[in-house]
Amino acid sequence: MQRSQQEERARVEQQLLEARQQHMRLQQESSTIRSLLVAAETGLHAVQQQIKELEEGEQVISDTIVALETSLQRVTAAEAAAAAPGGPAAAGAAGAAAGAAAAPGGPAAAGAAAAPGSAAAGAPGSTAGPPTTAAAAAAAAAAAAAAAAGPTPLLTPAEFKALEDNIYLQTKLRLGRQLEAINQTLQQAAAVLQEAEAAATNLSSTGPSGRQISDQLLQKAAAIQLTLNTQEEYLRDVVARLESKQIICDSTLQRLRVAMEAALGRYSSVLQQQVQQQQQQIAATAEALLAAAAADAGQIKQQLETEIRRVSSMHIPVETAAQQQQLLQQQVLAWENALGQSFASLDALLDAAAATAAAAAALPPVHALDLSKLQQTVKRAQEAKKEIRHERAKLQQLLDILAAHLAEENQQQQQLLLQQQQHYMHPQHQPHLFPYGSIQPPVHTPAEPYAAYALPRQMPQQQQQQQQQQQQQLQPLQPLQPAHLTSQLYQQPALPALQHMQQLQQQQLQQQQRSSNSHLPLQPPFGGPHMAMGGGPPK
């Protein structure tokens, strides 16, 4: 009896041990299956995020389609405008006419005004403006207006960049890589889910507990499988939309390429013509402006130099010279105003050339243009403007020299007038104040016994020298005869300094003569005999 109880106890313990081991095995297997299900769910979450990125790529493709269609419409409109009667031909004819008008020998008024013997420009005191520079300014304005009416750029640089389809190709490659990653994630999630279902199915054969755990795991696996199927269907829809939009984008891009190949050929030829026209316009305008400005500046310079010679040689009154200076200043001001208008028109031409060069630089390498000649022409135009500025500075310098000569002559005349006033205020030129003569006897003190018999202090030779000095002061200034024009323009006359030195020398001579006269022996009174200084009568 006791033995049977021990055997029963051992059998129960063995069953408990086996049940415990089976339970532990079920827990391990269920944990493994749950881990597989969690991995499948994680893969599904990753698939959802990647599908969202695909939808963003779909928006990029949609924006690309809109940009390509806009560019295509613009190219089509440009081609239609170019094909219209008088479209680019009118602009080209206007540009050619403006270029011919801006040519150096084009306008007759400019040629006539540039004649060396023009009376209106060469006559001294003429108030008329510089006709040559004015004609060049009008021609430059016409050329600038023609350049502003040139063709607008076919496409912007951003549109050319979109035309190269780099962004679109990069987007397609990125979407392809994302779709491949989504497919791999879906395959991995499906494989993990399939492994979990197989393990859960095997777990159901381990008894009631196994079947219960297996049912729970299989139910969860079925829910994950449903989500997986849903994501796959949604992905198919997204991929279908992407493929349809890619087809539209590829078709639009192909049509744009075909239209652009035709349009770029025409546009490059139009730009080439525009570059040539602008090159001719800039060259003709710069040459005409430089020639006109040089001609007018030469005439004004000649007038200024003539006026400087007349003023420096005192062949003209100061008042007349001042009036002539005002007239010359007005003439220079009119010339500078015409230059300002010409510079503005030339700058407009240069700006139009810069815009054309930028449009040509945006062309594809196949349709690239040679802009070296245009750049050289622009450089020469800048040099012409620099030369004109130098001429302007020279005229301003001559005006300053003329003003300095006028100020010097005015100062000399004022000094001469002051000397004349002082000379006529001298007592010997006012006999009504001294009725007994201009030369008064010196006043001596009673201590001088022979004071009544003193001779005059001024000798006849001294009076003659003083009269010659006064006559020299009253004589008009003789004209200077400089050796060269430069010495007249840049060297001030030395007449005041010479007069001052002569006056000082004459004053010193007069003082010496006065001192010698004061020591002369006295004559006997009333013609009597000479008395010796010893005090006794003559023997």
Image (cartoon, rainbow, N blue to C red):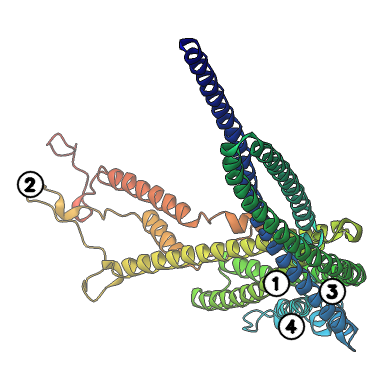
- The amino acid type found where label 3 is placed reads Pro
Q: CA distance from mark 3 to mark 2?
A: 97 Å
Task: Identify the disc placed on residue 90.
Answer: none
Query: Tag 4: Cα neighbours inside 10 Å, few (<14), some, or many (≥20)?
Result: few
Q: Determine contact: label 4, label 2, CB under 8 Å.
A: no
Classify the position of the C terminus by image quarter: top left
Task: Identify the disc placed on residue 348.
Answer: 1
Q: CA distance from mark 4 to mark 1?
A: 33 Å
The numbered mark, 3 or 1, whose residue comes first in the sequence reads 3
Direction top: furthest residue: 3
Check disc 2 and report the residue beneath it. 447
Residue 277 appears left or right of 237? right
Q: CA distance from mark 2 to mark 1?
A: 98 Å
Q: CA distance from mark 3 to mark 4?
A: 21 Å
- The amino acid type found where label 2 is placed reads Ala
- The amino acid type found where label 4 is placed reads Ala
Residue 364's x, y, as percent? 85, 59
Nearer the observer, 187 or 255: 187
**Front of the two marks 3 and 1:** 1
Looking at the rendered structure, the secondary structure element under dot 3 is loop
Q: Residue at x 85, y 75 (%)?
A: 103
